[in-house]
Amino acid sequence: MGFSTFRNALQKRSTILSPSLLSRFSRTIVTDAQTVTTASSQEAWKKFGITAAAVAGAVILAEGLLNRDTRDSLTATEQSYLHDSFKYTGGGLVLTALAARSMFKSGVAFRIMAANPWVVLGVSLVGSIGSMMGVYYTPPEKTVQKHLFWLGFNACQAATLSPLFFFSPAILSRAALYTCGVVGSLSYVGATARNDKYLYMGGPLLAGVTVVALSSLAPMALPLGMRGLAVAESISLYGGLAVFGGFVLYDTQKILQHARMAEAGAIPRDPMKESIALELDMINIFIRLVQILAMRSNNRK
């Protein structure tokens, strides 16, 4: 995949949070008795155990199906580059979550919801893409400037995600757990696959994320009926899960490819740049899981 195509993929993979979703955020208020709380805690731990077992089984199944012809063990350079990239990814996600929580408590989320959804979406996209490209184009030698762009990128993501805290904490925690399971299993598959096995997916995934983005914006621009809205929402949610799951495989192998190129001196070593794509993958998967869990919770009522 060429450099311009890769740059377009990064730009189009910005956090997709539709204006219609911003206007529908709600928070569940729980005021049950102590006995109900204890029962809920036991049920939560039961679900946690089932989820952990399911994730472990999914890793084993995915590894067996997708990586029958596995690669040799990762070299020290590949391991170091992959670990550093995931460290920046984890650090960025922690900063984003803390900043989003602080914005929610300070009332920024209320002001975001009260503002024009199109303005919120446009400002968040411009800020995210601008800071992301700043990280991308700033040389690793300019440490301070690069970290400032990185902090700005995470601040933009936090502003976009702060309304998610209107959802129940139980939904957010389950979505975070599922996201870690999905990304962890797919990253493991990508890291243990043969070199460049999934890099061919770059073009199809770019087309897929374009369809997902258009389906997220379609209800705001087109006079769709109820069936059309349901189809567009399904494409945005479930199609988005498939597309960003594929991006996890692609980005993991891209990091390993760049590690080999950096070792050969073809490109500079830049794990911060690599972490941006992984962070966007995880955020977009998390958003969709929150929406799906919230829909299931509302259907049970």
Image (spheres, grey):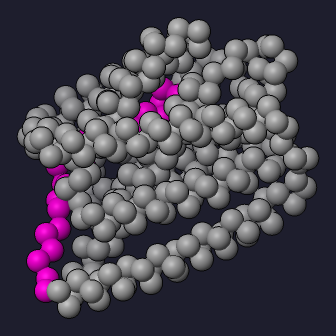
- Left or right, residue 31 beside residue 121: left
**The quarter of the displayed image where residue 83 is located:** top right
**In this view of the protein, which residue sits in the foreground, 178 or 94?**
94
Residue 122 on the magenta segment: no
Picture layout, residue 211 above or below residue 298 = above
Tell me what residue is drawn at x 81 percent, y 27 percent: 260
Tell me what residue is drawn at x 82 percent, y 36 percent: 76
Q: Is the magenta stretch mostly helix, strand or loop?
A: loop
**The quarter of the displayed image where residue 15 is located:** top left
Tell me what residue is drawn at x 27 percent, y 63 percent: 169
Dividing the image into 4 quarters, which one contains the N terminus? top right
Q: Residue 67's x, y, as percent? A: 82, 57
Tell me what residue is drawn at x 48 percent, y 63 percent: 178
- Left or right, residue 266 beside residue 289: right
**The quarter of the displayed image where residue 124 is located:** top left
Picture layout, residue 125 above or below residue 25 = above
Question: The magenta stretch spans which residues?
Answer: 10-33
Residue 32 on the magenta segment: yes
Q: Work out whether residue 254 can be spotted.
A: no
